[in-house]
Amino acid sequence: MTGWNNIGAAFRAFDGPEWRITHTTDYERRADIVVSVVGLLYAEAHAELEIIIDCPDTPVIAPAEARKLGMALIAAADSTEAIS
């Protein structure tokens, strides 16, 4: 977490939890898919949260990877409710 900033409104930027799904491309290159929660927490106690899905290119994933990605997205969404 960073310190409080005052640019119009006092807020703190933060990185929340992260989930990593191991993905191997057609060329046997490892290219993980990462789901993370980031956001801003304002001094008046409300938060603006976003979920980021980071992966190289547009992956074509196997069903098992899709299930892991789905579980990671649900867990990320659940964690934003706990924070805000």
Image (cartoon, rainbow, N blue to C red):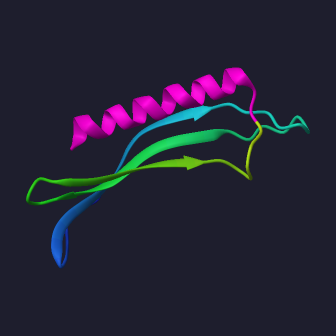
Vertical comparison of 81 with 40: above or below:
above
**Residue 2 located left or right of residue 23:** left
At horizontal 11% and vertical 60% (from top left) the residue drawn is: 43
Image coords of residue 26 (percent x, y)? 89, 37
When asked about the image quadrant of residue 60, the answer is top right
At horizontal 63% and vertical 40% (from top left) the residue drawn is: 33
Q: Residue furthest right?
A: 27
Vertical comparison of 11 with 17: above or below:
below
At horizontal 47% and vertical 43% (from top left) the residue drawn is: 36
Q: Nearer the viewer, residue 38 or 50?
A: 50
Quarter of the image that includes the C terminus = top left
Residue 23 located within the stretch drawn in magenta? no
At horizontal 17% and vertical 79% (from top left) the residue drawn is: 8
Q: Is residue 3 visible?
A: no
Secondary structure predominantly adopted by residues drawn in magenta: helix
Image coords of residue 83 (percent x, y)? 23, 40
Residue 62 located within the stretch drawn in magenta? yes
**Residue 80 located left or right of residue 46:** right
Image coords of residue 58 (percent x, y)? 73, 49
Vertical comparison of 47 with 77: above or below:
below
Q: Is residue 39 visible?
A: yes
Q: Residue furthest bottom?
A: 8
**Residue 36 located left or right of residue 64:** left
Q: Residue furthest left?
A: 44
Residue range of the region highlighted in magenta in the rendering: 61-84
Q: How many marks?
A: 0
When asked about the image quadrant of residue 16, the answer is top left
**Residue 67 located left or right of residue 59:** left
